[in-house]
Amino acid sequence: MEHMTDRSSTYLQETILIIEPGRTEKNYWADLWRYRELFLILAWRDIAVRYKQTVIGILWAILRPLLTMVVFTVIFGRIAGLPSDGGAPYALMVFAAMLPWSLFSNALSESSNSLIGNANLIGKIYFPRMIVPAATLVTAFIDFLISLAILLVMMVWYQFAPGWQIVLLPAFIILALSASLGPGLWITALNVKYRDFRYVIPFVVQFGLYISPVGFSSGVIPEKWRFLYSLNPLVGVIDGFRWCILGGNSPLYLPGFLLSLAVIVFFLWLGVSRFRKTEKTFADLI
């Protein structure tokens, strides 16, 4: 009996929960790593349900960028007669821009509604809420990989070989995800309190498609406006993708790229800071 009492005492001592003021705040970034399994579970769930109960399923990830590429090639390349970058086929130039645009737009759309879609989970248990919007980036990345495979097929079809710049493509992929994560964190935090943002985001994404150099080369922008045009962070990302894929046919405009990079870093800092500032109120508002 005495032996059982000692064991119970030891167990109770081992399972004491220490409540320390500010402990969660101090360990927030470490908790992101501790809850990595939850991140993987949420990401896998989003992938599993993305095309569930659709007739053609994952083929939507192929059809959407392909159809957009065809429309832009006809409108800007054939009807408007805008030039391609160097000697690259116009369709290849457009599709090289569709890759980062689709990655950005899918990640932004999914992350901006992620907290609302996980309201039950957020209201029940503690975990770093940033995991929820971050997990949606995985789904967008899977669609990106499918589109990247289509690009490889197109390059074989046009007998177009990339240059050495292609080795830097992973860096621009990370840049595209960062460009979506910053605004995504900010918007999803606002969306918890102001549900109007769920209707605003599709309009913003559609509008952004036409003001970004997706269907045309950024080289057609007059030189005196090109630097200011790079305030759109997607300009630098798209130009970077084209530079990696098309090589010397699409030179990188360095001043504009550095400006786009600065804008991306600013919005990433703003998104994280605003998200962290309002995170404590999510469970009450949602």
Image (spheres, helix red, strand yellow):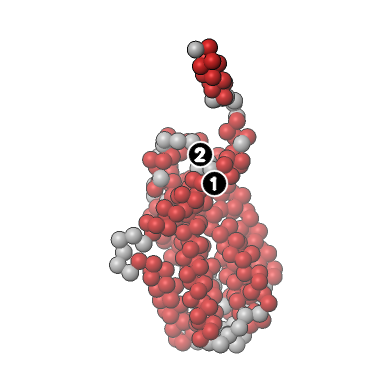
Q: Secondary structure at mark 1?
A: helix
Specify the amino acid type for callout 1.
Answer: Arg
Task: Say which quadrant the C terminus sits in.
Answer: top left
Task: Tell me if I can see residue 52 in this picture.
Answer: yes
Q: Position of residue 98 (x, y in %)?
A: 50, 72
Q: Is residue 9 above or below residue 120?
A: above
Q: Position of residue 281 (x, y in %)?
A: 47, 36
Specify the amino acid type for callout 2.
Answer: Phe
Q: Quadrant of residue 253?
A: bottom right
**Mark 1: few/some/many CA within 10 Å (<14, 14-19, 20+):** few
Q: Quadrant of residue 260?
A: bottom right
Q: Secondary structure at mark 2?
A: loop
**Mark 2: few/some/many CA within 10 Å (<14, 14-19, 20+):** some
| Residue at 62 percent of width and 53 percent of height | 266
N-term-proximal mark, 1 vs 2: 1
| Residue at 48 percent of width and 63 percent of height | 142
Look at mark 2 in the image and give the residue it sits on. Answer: 127
Q: Is residue 26 above or below residue 272?
A: above
Disc sitting over residue 36 in the figure = 1
Please indicate whether residue 61 sits to the left or right of residue 234 in the image: left
Q: Is residue 70 above or below residue 110?
A: below
Q: CA distance from mark 1 to mark 2?
A: 10 Å
